Each structure stands twice: as structure tokens, then as C-alpha cells.
Image (tube, coloured by chain):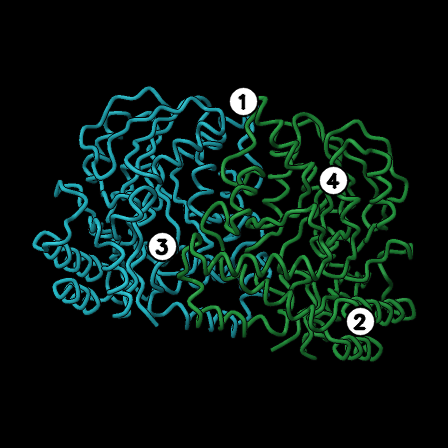
Chain colours: A green, B cyan
Amino acid sequence: MAVTFSPGPSQLYFTVEDHTRSAFKLGVPSLSHRSPEFEKIYQHTQESLRALLNIPSSHHIFFAGSATEIWERLIQNLVEEKSAHYVNGAFSEKFFKASQQLNRQAQEIRVADGSGFNEPALLDVELIGVTHNETSTGVMLPKEFIYGLKAKNPKALLCVDAVSALPYADFDYTKIDSVYFSVQKGFGMPPGLGVWIVNDACIAKANAMLAKGLSIGTHHTLPFYLKNGLKNQTPETPNSVAIYVLGKVAEDMLRRGIDTIRKETEYKAVVLYNELKQHALMQPFVVEKQYQSPTVIIANTGTQTQALADYLSKKGMEAGEGYGQHKGTQLRFANFPAHSKEQYELLVDYLKAF
Amino acid sequence: MAVTFSPGPSQLYFTVEDHTRSAFKLGVPSLSHRSPEFEKIYQHTQESLRALLNIPSSHHIFFAGSATEIWERLIQNLVEEKSAHYVNGAFSEKFFKASQQLNRQAQEIRVADGSGFNEPALLDVELIGVTHNETSTGVMLPKEFIYGLKAKNPKALLCVDAVSALPYADFDYTKIDSVYFSVQKGFGMPPGLGVWIVNDACIAKANAMLAKGLSIGTHHTLPFYLKNGLKNQTPETPNSVAIYVLGKVAEDMLRRGIDTIRKETEYKAVVLYNELKQHALMQPFVVEKQYQSPTVIIANTGTQTQALADYLSKKGMEAGEGYGQHKGTQLRFANFPAHSKEQYELLVDYLKAF
């Protein structure tokens, strides 16, 4: 089967299909989510993720249906009145709009697609939303900018969209209140599970809103997540197979070594960016080196877009389409742990020969 | 592997594992949910469900993470001020509480666990919630009562929890505004997908609330579901493997014949209820015949509960635990399409011999 470089749903991680098969053999699909057997799976996934991403005990890990759902839960649980959103693409904009849809006063700090931010502003809001890696534009914001936001706005809850950044991103979680992602990107799994990491300041804020008589939702509220999570359970009957597989994939990545995965990601990114810079028919969309994402690499391919996509497709490589208005003029290349160095070297060889 | 009679997550339908394997072979996990390939899967699942359950074109079918999520979405989208809930067990109560958590004026009409309703009341509310089959108590409310509710309250939106009732329940959807279920019960799938059926009156109500400037949520609002659904797409990256498998399972059930499935369900229910009535050590929990659910059959097993559960377990049959306060004194037996006549006959033989 062809390798897909689409940024998500993306190429499956090497072991996902086997783990899914094991889940069925072990009877995971029929397990009660209140059973000790499920609790063990939940705990294993939590511990594996914690070890892989170096998540400190100050932060809790909860499961939702998607990162899209988590945008909504963040606003419901953490914002009474005001949020601010750094917008530099379609996904950061969706979070901004979610806050508006929930009738909050949402402030937008915007730059053009393909650009980023490096000067933290002083913001009079309860929550700051920032997208570490914009999947639509291939911009990765510097971690120092993100930490700087928290330093400048210590009372605001800093929430980081890490959807296409993890497991590559090596965060200092003590400088972030919430991080979230979905599993169909860097973890190479089928879609249907979002992972929501929050610290106690987030839990406290949700409890404070609840104490004021404000609604923070029903089953996916932070206090209810925590109450269940402390028992290694979920609020509702969850996507248990995905929770099982995520734990196994995290374990596999731990065994491979997260440092190795990060170094390989950087190697593959350098190889592709170098080729894009030299190529006569394409260029990197993101011009400023400080913003060039290693995990989602976007090429301006102009009038050659369709021809190049078809050419790669015949070689067994499916490039991701440009996002939104960039659909006909760009191609996107995910650089996730499921993409091997050999595949990236081959991709570059094919690009050279195009 | 043992057969599980737990009402959910329950025994997998015979073909689920094979269809999951096919989904991986076909590359479903890596498909973009905006691609024509995904749209075909979406359409197939919609059409198969429509054919199987006889859902008229007046009703739309949308996908959520769980039935638990759908409780929240129903209130967010359809209730500005007031809802009423027929409560006769843990799940109908959870829906009632979801409305309270969203700060609506929620009215509760309650009977004791194991009992039901047959007199529709006149209710001054926007939404009436009723649970066709209470998974926690094994009570199935008569369809005539449900239709009577709509006849008596034509302006209220009648929303029917069919979680452990479908595909057995043969609804006249023209007399119901919304029906919802999750796939880990009668459809015999792993958990992680809720199915939400609504008519145009529901869409209109959500649009009217939106026009008033009220918030109805973000990605899982009815207008946004509809906008995407008309393109055979979902609002967010969905649990695409589950959507694929659900369509295939519905197709398999269609081939087997929904009438056959319904008749077999009734046969199996009669066989087990007859045994419970005659047995010296156990009785049906639901006494009134009109409320005895064919799909979730609950036995009062008193002090014999643990011994009986262990005995059946040794025979390769896992009974479901009693729910909540009934945990130590009842056993629950799901009677879904995944449970064969032979398994039910064997179960009854084992009960006789206990």
C-alpha cells in the first residue's frame, strides 16, 4: 500500500494494526470501562504517555473524542468571559471561533498564513490559546515564545495545541497549563481519540466556575474527568480500543527511544527542506527558518501541484493536499515517527528527478 | 473466548473483527474525512442504517462520540429553558442531570427502578426525554406510550434513548423527533461511536436558538452536522473505522433479515424469562410483563449472585453485573443480535442445572 504523507489522518505507525488485532484477541472491545481489566489498560496508557512525553505528576491526562472537542471543553471549563488566540492558520482560527460560538469575548492576534509569532503580548484574558504547530500552514512556533507567554501572563491559563507536534515536541510542561493532541497525527493511529493534558490550575478554574453556578458542561468537565481518572476510569464508555493501542504505541516509541525519534524527525526535515530550497519548481512555503515546522513541511508547488502529486502517487507516495485556499498550489508532507528515514530519502530522490 | 452477556460493551457481532481487519486493509484509518473515499463510506453507512432501521428521509443521521455526549448535545441544541425527563433508572436519570448541569429547568417524572410508564402526561417543556429501554433496570417502555407522549405534546421535541433497544426496536420515526444509540450494545461493536437521528424540527429549533444569539455549542451543533452531512462528511475528523464497520454490520444484519433478528430476539427472551419465572433461586426483576425488556433481561439472584456468576463463568458465559445498588443481588443478560439462539438455550440449560 502507498505511504501517505498527508498530515492527518496520516500514515499508520508500524505496530498499530498488530496492536488492534491484539486488542480484539484480548477482548478489549467487550470490556466494561468500570472493570479492573480496563483500569489496568487506562493506567498503562497513562504511564506510557507520561514516560514518553515526560509529563510531570502536576499534570493530568484525559481522553476526549477529538482535539476539536477539546477546543470546546477548554472554553467551557476555563473561560468565564475572555480568551485570546494566536491565529496563524485554519486550526488556530477554529479554536478562536469556538470561543465566539460559546459566546465568550474572544480576542484574536493574527498574522498571515505561513508566518508566526515571537513576541509575547500582555493579555487581559483568562485563557491564551496558541498552536505550537499549525497543520494548515506548516508553522511551528518557538517554544521560548510559548513559555514567554506564560511568563508575561502568569494568571492566564496557557493552552497549547500540539496536534501535529507530538511526540516530537519536547515541552517543559511546568510552563504550560494545558496541552492537547489527537492520535491520528504523530502517533500514527486511526482517528477517534483526543488527549487532553491539564494541570491543577485548570481543575481549580473549572471548580471555581462551577461554584459560581456557571455551567461547564456535562460528562467532559474537568472535575468529572478527575473524579473518574483517579480510579483509572473515563466519564463515559470510551473508545477503549484506541486507549489500549495508544498505550502500546507509546510503549513501542519508548523502546525505540524518544531521542532517536526526535533526531530522526530533524534529520528527515533537513533533508526535505534542503531539497525544497534547491528545487527549481518548488520552495518551502514557510520562509522564516525559525518557524519552519519539522513535522509538517509545506511546499509551494504552484502550477506543478497536480502533476507532482500524480507523479508521487505513481511512485507509491501520497502527498497531502494544501489546506483550504492553498489546495491547488501547495503540497504538505507530514514528518511523523511512522515515516522512515528511507522513505524520506526516497521522497527527496523522487523530487529531484521530477 | 467466553461469551459475554454484559449489556455493553457487549459481545461483538460475528463479523466485526473481520470488518475491522478489512478497514485496515482498505486504508480507512489513514483516509482524509474530506476525501471522496470517506464520503462513500459515510454514505454507505447512512444508507445501510436507514434500510435496516427503516429511517425515513425526514430524519438525518449524525455521529458523535457516545450516547452520553448526545444527551449533552440534545439539551444544548434543543432546549432554551425547559426539559422533562421520564426517569426509571440510572441512564434516564443521567440525561435529566445533564439538563440540570447545563442550567436548564429540568423536570423529572420518576418511578421506582424496575417499573415503567404508560400514561403520557401533558408537559409544558421544549424537550421530552424518554428511555425506550433502561439498560440499568431491564425495563422497556411500550412504544404506544412513547407515541402517546408526542400526540399529547405535539410542540415538544420527543427524544428517545434507544441505546440498548436497537436494532430490535421497530420505531415509527414519524412519531419521534430524535432517536439515539451507541454501537457497543445491539450492534455488537467496540465502543467509541454514538448515532444521533434527528428530524427537521430539531434542526429548526437549533437554528432558532442560534438566531436568538444563544450558544448551541461548537462543532457538534445540528446546523453544522447538517452542513457537513449533506456532503457525506462529519464536522471533525471522526472515528472513521467505526463508521465503516457500522455500515458493514448494518449490511450484514440486513442480509440476515431484520425480521429474523427481531423474531430471534423475542424467542430468546421468552426462553430466558420462562426459565427465570420457574427457577427456585431467581426471578425476573421486572414484574410487569408490559415492561419486561426483550433486549436486557435482569434476574434477581439475591444471595446466589456471586455463586451463579462464577458458575456461568466456568461454563464460558459472563453474565452482566447488576447496575449500581443492584450490583450484588442481580445479574443482567443482554439479548442482542450477537447472542445466538443456541447460546441462549445453553444458558437456560445451565441455569436449570444450577
Chain to which the residue tagged by mark 3 belongs = B
Q: Which mark is residue B212?
A: 1
Q: Is residue A83 visible?
A: yes
Chain where mark 1 sits: B
Name the kind of residue labelled 4 in the image.
Answer: Gly
Looking at the image, tell me whether mark 2 or mark 4 is earlier in sequence order.
4
Q: Are marks 3 and 2 in contact (CB under 8 Å)?
A: no
Which residue type carries mark 3?
A: Gly
* Residue linked to disc 2: A264
> Image quadrant of residue A290?
bottom right
Q: Write down the residue under mark 4.
A: A129
Asked if residue B84 lies left or right of residue A261, the reply is: left
Which residue occupies 70% across, 79% down?
A315
Q: Amino acid at mark 2?
A: Glu
Q: Secondary structure at mark 1?
A: loop
- Are there few (<14), some (14-19), or many (20+) residues within 10 Å of tag 1? few
Q: Nearer the viewer, residue A210 or A100?
A: A210
Q: Earlier in the sequence, mark 3 or mark 1?
A: 3
Q: Are marks 1 and 4 on the same chain?
A: no
Front residue of this view, candidates A145 and A100: A145
Q: Residue at x 23, y 59 (%)?
A: B308
Which structural element holds mark 3?
loop
Residue B251 rendering spot, x and y as whole percentages: 34, 64
From this view, report whether residue B340 is shown above or below residue A71: below
Q: Which residue is mark 3?
A: B8
